[in-house]
Image: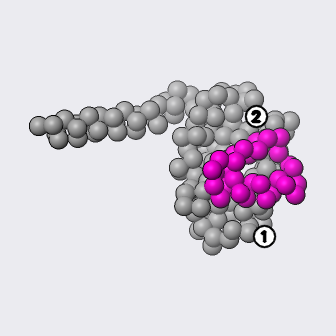
Amino acid sequence: MKVRLVYGVGALLYLIALGAMFLPAMRGMTRTTIEISGRQGRPCLGTVWQQGSTPRALMLIGHGVTSNQGIMALLAKSFAQNGYVAVAFDFWGHGRSRERFDWFANPDQIRAWVAWAREEYPGLPVAYLGHSMGGFSGGDTFNKEPIVDAFVSLG
């Protein structure tokens, strides 16, 4: 009897969490899948999350080595709910990317996303948040060339 109760409560909590992940999309948030050109014209794939028409800044979000942009979607939605244009993207070899993984190409991909952000949203502050590998790659990129207005490294 107790086992069924535990499983029932667990299933209910899971459904509540699942619903919470998708509620923002029902309240005027837009989600757009995009592709930009990286080094040598290779595709960089991402998703733009936005709520409202006057964003305060743009947040680029890079994932860790065993992850992808999908794992960062909840974080992106949270930024979008708070007035940011949030862009979660896949490094090559991860998620929807069909390019071969290349650790040393990550800074070039970040630069491509920053250039895209500056062109698409002129005058808007651009920040980058990277988790694990994404944070390391951000540090490598911005130590040499501080091209963003803010940088956050997680883990």
Q: Is residue 117 above or below residue 27?
A: below
Q: Residue furthest right?
A: 145
Q: Is residue 121 above or below residue 90?
A: above
CA separation in Å, label 2 and label 1: 28 Å
Q: Residues within 10 Å of mark 1 (few under 14, many from 20)?
A: few
Judge from the rendering whether residue 34 lies leftward or rightward of residue 113; answer left or right: left
Residue at 65% x, 59% y is 133
Tell me the kind of residue under disc 1: Gln
Residue 28 spot, x, y in % from top left:
56, 28
Judge from the rendering whether residue 7 lies leftward or rightward of residue 81; answer left or right: left
148 is within the stretch colored magenta: yes
Residue at 53% x, 50% y is 70
In the picture, the disc for residue 40 is 1
Residue 95 spot, x, y in % from top left:
55, 60
Per the image, label 2 sits on a secondary structure element best described as strand
Residue 34 shows in this picture: no
Quadrant housing residue 44: bottom right
Residue at 68% x, 50% y is 130
Residue at 72% x, 44% y is 152
Residue range (magenta): 126-155
Tell me the kind of residue under disc 2: Ala
